[in-house]
Amino acid sequence: MTDKQIKYNQLKNNEKDIVIFIIIAFAFGYISYLVLLASTTDLKDIYAGACSVAGGVIGGIITLQGVKRTIVAQREITLEGVERTITAQREITLEGVKATIEAQKEQEMLKLIPQRLIALHGLTKEIEQFNEKVTELTWITSHDEGFEEDKIGDLKASIKYMNEKIEKVIDFFEGLNDTEYRFIGIVSKIDIDIYKTVKIAFDRLKQEYVWLLASSELQDYYAIVFFPEKVIEETFIESRNQLIKKLNSLRVWIENNFKELELVIPEKLNQYEKEML
């Protein structure tokens, strides 16, 4: 109950007491008047009786008000005490629930650590296999024994050989989705930080593939070899060399792109091993 409500109730009670007092006083005056007319009672005696009755009524009203205020005050004190007790119990209960939840979380985290350590080792093996595929791109994206940088023997054979290199690079990128799913399956058992690192790495790879397909180096090469019988040797050599440089720089970028992930793994291993101790 608010202070405004309490004051309002007290005011209503006071009004009721005043009305009762007026009614009693009026009734006593009227009865006294009738008695005065019907008997030889002295007016002084009637006045004395009226004062006695009025004093009793006023005293009763004052006593009643005191009792009411005492009851209201005790009720307020009791309600405040109950509210404080309930609030304190609620706070204690909430703190206890929070502590219990935190303890359960810690226990669950400890149970997951062995699984995370296994997943981290699995991720290491997956990265090693991926790096092997990237290493295979080294000879694909470089000048090897299949042709020399400034001259060619058989033009058609050189075009075919270069086309095979491009197809292998495209096969590497086309297989990224399957590789990504394997990585995600592993890192989802570790934590959100490594998941984000892996997701960003593969998103960048896919974007680089899109840029490669739209690059001027690849587009110019395809435009030159579209009609093999009309290819000019010097033009082919220049376009091929430009594309080889493009593919080689892309390979180097791929290697660097996964270095961040490789650096995170030892840190996570060290972290979870310490938490197990």
Image (spheres, grey):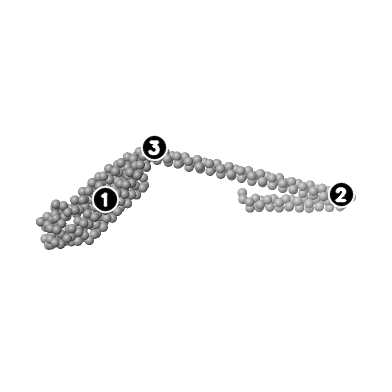
- Mark 3 secondary-structure assignment: loop
Depth check, mark 2 against mark 1: the one in front is 1
Disc 2 residue type (three-letter)? Asp
Instruction: Report which residue position mark 2 lands on.
Output: 45
Left or right relative to 80: residue 160:
left
The residue nearer to you, when weighing 53 against 86, is 86
Sooner in the amino-acid sequence: mark 3 or mark 2 = 2
The picture quadrant where one finds residue 87 is: top right
Q: In which quarter of the image is the C terminus?
A: top left
Q: Which residue lies furthest to the top in this view?
A: 277
Q: Disc 3, disc 2: CB below 8 Å?
A: no
Q: How crowded is mark 2: few (under 14 residues within 10 Å), some or many (20 or more)?
A: few
The residue nearer to you, when weighing 89 against 32, is 89
Disc 1 residue type (three-letter)? Glu
- Write the residue at 72% across / 48% down: 65
Distance Cα–Cα, label 3 vs label 2 = 101 Å
Left or right relative to 80: residue 66:
right
Q: Can residue 112 be seen in this view?
A: no
Left or right relative to 270: residue 146:
left
Instruction: Report which residue position mark 1 lands on.
Output: 255
Instruction: Report which residue position mark 3 lands on.
Output: 277
Sooner in the amino-acid sequence: mark 2 or mark 1 = 2
- Write the residue at 21% across / 51% down: 138
Q: How crowded is mark 1: few (under 14 residues within 10 Å), some or many (20 or more)?
A: some
Disc 3 residue type (three-letter)? Leu
- Write the residue at 25% across / 52% down: 252
